[in-house]
Image: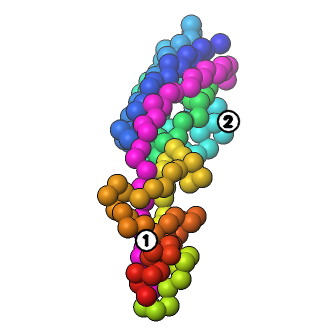
Amino acid sequence: VPVITVAPATIEENSAAVGTVAGTFTATDEETPRSGLTITFTGNSNADGYYAIDGNNVVLTKEGADFVNAGNQLPKIDLTVTDPAGAHSNGEGQPTVNLVNDVPVITVAPATIEENSAAVGTVAGTFTATDEETPRSGLTITFTPGTNTDGYYAIDGNNVVLTKAGADFVN
């Protein structure tokens, strides 16, 4: 019976590319040289197409590199070695992805406010805050130091709204 062992690699988020080695393998059989053995992914273990076999390496495809660079852990590598007589065995290994704490991003869209129609709570702008590692509910939104010193604005959900001082200033 042929034997296969998988040695998974460690990959850094944001540095994965097509061809990055996710693992290596060794396939042996007492009766068959390596060139006579067939190596395949076991079952549907590579259904997402993250991996390709290149020589004795399992490398990332574009899908795999994109998946890693988006901050995700890869699925295990699961390979089957088969000899010409149909005897086979499996080997697996779990690659490690070292995740990077990416910087959160915020975009602000200002609103138009008509003079003499502003009230407390009038929306002065909306914002979208995102982070690869943290859901919106876990992000803290504050005014940049040195801004809003007159207290014209308050944060309400994903809105920047006028306070009494802000409404009075607009009117």
Image x and y of residue 106, in percent: 42, 59
Q: Is residue 163 above or below residue 119?
A: above
Structure colour scheme? rainbow
- The amino acid type of the residue labelled 2 equals Gly
- Number of labels in the image equals 2
View extreme (top): residue: 30
Question: Residue placed at 43% from the left, 71% from the top?
Answer: 152
Question: Residue placed at 40% from the left, 47% from the top?
Answer: 103
Q: Quadrant of residue 83?
A: top right
The residues bearing labels 1 and 2 have C-alpha atoms spaced at a distance of: 61 Å
Secondary structure type for disc 2: loop
Quadrant in which the C terminus is drawn: bottom left
Q: Is residue 24 above or below residue 112?
A: above
Q: Nearer the viewer, residue 20 or 103?
A: 103
Pointer 1 and pointer 2: residues touching (CB < 8 Å)?
no
Look at the image and give the residue range highlighted in magenta.
86-113
**Residue denoted by label 1:** 152
**Residue denoted by label 2:** 43
171 relative to 46 in the view: left or right: left
Would residue 128 be seen by someone viewing this image from the given angle? yes
Say if the magenta span includes residue 133.
no
Q: Quadrant of residue 144?
A: bottom left
Image x and y of residue 10, in percent: 44, 26
How crowded pointer 2 is (Cα within 10 Å; few <14, some 14-19, many 20+) is rated as: few
Quadrant in which the N terminus is drawn: top right
